[in-house]
Amino acid sequence: MSIAIYTKNEKQSQKWFEALKSNLPNETIEIYPDISNLDLVTFLVCWKPEEGLLDKLPNLQAIQSLGAGVDHILDYHTVPAHIQVSKVVDDNLTHDMWEHAMSIIMSDMKNLSIHSKNQSTKTWKPKRYKRIREVSIGVLGLGTIGKYVASQFSITGFKVGGWSRSKKKIEHVNTFSGESGLNSLLSVSDYIVNILPLTPGTKGIINHNFLSNMKQGSYLINIGRGPHVVDEDLLSSIDSGHIRGAGLDVFHSEPLPEGSPFWNHPSIIITPHVASLTHINSVYAQVVENYKRLKNEKQLINLVDLIKGY
Ligand code: GLV
């Protein structure tokens, strides 16, 4: 049995190596591509594994994603049913998603981008702002992260609705499911925060139809995945004045290509996939736990349903 680490960032891989080695000193842990025997790898710890990697590991038994999402694995690899796939579930990561969405919303409600632009031309221009209790937020996706984000908004004083594939119950959150439920939520929300997992069923969900159903003058925040959005549809919705703007943290292609029209759009705020970053100190224990479970032939924690894709 051995552990292979794969990330596209050498420093990151090294840090993971150190964290795992100090907790599993007697195990063989190696950083891909420097693997002494690919046949011995049973546990793959990875972020965005390169194409074909799984085919090189004939005795792989488990894949541990280094993030909350697993689309970077399931979208590009056929994972045989006997392989267990686990994601990271972490309170810090979950809370950070809320802080990010909250920052974009508060900044927009208080017109900070406009004041910042005015400052650069020494322009003094008061502008009406919004109050929390007057604003409604719709959260798409009510898994561990979405549920928490929706609750936090509600505790803060916003009017909150949430949508998920199957109906969920969350205290003080108006929950919806199904297509008509989605349209009901879209039509009443001042801000839509997308936290859906990326699956074949959610790819392209934020399209012309979706955007047309959003409330006139509302705002989109995407901290899910880039491919949830049909980019041209979002641009035309903003340019037509139906959607007021968007805060985008994730994109079809990352880093966002230089030629993307999003970069220069005055109504779009771009952040470089930083809504929440995995901190090794906060999550290494669950990766170690999963390896021990695999060794003891126990089911892994934070397991992904390969059929649902999250
Ligand atoms: C980040 O995008 C993650 O999946 O953790």
Image: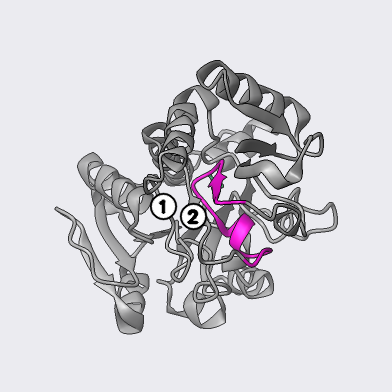
| Mark 1 secondary-structure assignment | loop
Residue 7 image position (x, y, % from top left): 71, 39
Cβ of mark 1 under 8 Å from ligand 1: the answer is no
| Left or right, 55 with reference to 112 | right
- Determine if the magenta segment contains residue 62: yes
Task: Identify the residue at image location x=51%, y=19%.
Answer: 23
For residue 35, above or below residue 303: above
Residue 157 image position (x, y, % from top left): 22, 44
Report which quarter residue 267 is drawn in. Answer: bottom right
For residue 178, above or below residue 58: below
Residue ID for mark 1? 303
Cβ of mark 2 under 8 Å from ligand 1: the answer is no
Q: CA distance from mark 2 to mark 1?
A: 7 Å
Task: Identify the residue at image location x=59%, y=20%.
Answer: 21
For residue 200, above or below residue 197: below
Task: Identify the residue at image location x=27%, y=61%.
Answer: 161
Query: Circle 2: is it few (<14), some (14-19), or many (20+) Cα within 10 Å?
Result: many
Does the CB distance between marks 2 and 1 fall below 8 Å?
yes
Report which quarter residue 165 is drawn in. Answer: bottom left
* The residue stretch that appears in magenta: 60-78
| Left or right, 95 with reference to 259 | left
